[in-house]
Amino acid sequence: MINVDLRSLARLPNLNKLRKLELANNRISGGLEVLAEKCPNLTHLNLSGNKIKDLSALEALQNLKNLKSLDLFNCEITTLEDYRESIFELLQQITYLNGFDQEDNEAPDSGSEDDEDGDEDDEEEDEAGPFEGYEEEEEEEEEDEDEDEAGSELGEGEEEVGLSYLMREEIQDEEDDDDYVEEGEEEEEGEGEEKEEEEEESVRGEKRKRDAEDDGEEEDD
């Protein structure tokens, strides 16, 4: 909340997990006790460019037990004599004031601190185990694999049925061919019998004709 013309923190919401709060370039002059109530886990607080004039305005920050870094650049309090020693004595939990510790050692880069915090969060997540969404994805993948296996088994069964069907069809075709051959042979046999009967009938007819001629000759005699 930098440079938003903020004058009071009275309406600050509860932010129990918040660690770093930027309030630079506003008009805050006091009422910092709200921070301990609403943001009890703050480690970094930037109040640069505000209307902080004396130590009494900072006394409320004693209740921020996790506070490590405090910035007061361009605040009127920085014009007081020995203000750094006074603030380190008042807020004994802090390590860095305006980016330096009591021995004038510069604070580490804020990016590296964020990386360390990120690593800690990753370790906590690893200890806690995979996310619920990840477990659901694994279950869905297992279900898909089961369906694929079932499908492949079904495909094999269908292939076996198909082969059996084709084999039965081939056997049936052979049987039909045999029946056709037998019917052809029967037809040929029938035609042969008819020819024999016709020949026999012709022979009998000629015989009857010869007999009739013989009878006619005997009558003439």
Image: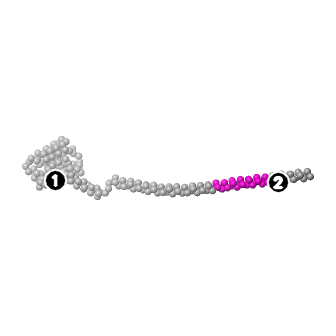
Where is mark 2, residue-wise? 207
Number of residues whose C-alpha sits closer than 10 Å to that of mark 1, classed few (under 14), some (14–19) or many (20 or more):
some
Marks 2 and 1, Cα distance to the nearest angstrom? 145 Å
What amino acid type should be assigned to the residue bearing mark 2?
Lys
Give residue 107's mark: 1
Q: Quadrant of the N terminus?
A: top left
Q: Position of residue 179 (x, y in %)?
A: 64, 55
> Can I make out residue 49 in this image?
yes
What amino acid type should be assigned to the residue bearing mark 1?
Ala
Q: Position of residue 180 (x, y in %)?
A: 64, 54
Kindly indicate the quadrant of the structure image that contains residue 176: bottom right
Residue at x 57%, y 56% (from the top left corner): 170
Residue at x 18%, y 46% (from the top left corner): 23
Q: Is residue 148 left or right of residue 73?
A: right
Residue at x 48%, y 57% (from the top left corner): 156
* Depth check, front residue: 80 or 101: 101
> Can I make out residue 37 in this image?
no
Give the SS element for disc 1: loop
Give residue 182's mark: none
Disc number lying in front (2 or 1): 2
- The boundaries of the magenta stretch are 179-203
| Magenta region includes residue 190 | yes
* Depth check, front residue: 110 or 193: 193
- Most extreme residue toward the right is 221
Q: Is residue 176 left or right of residue 214?
A: left
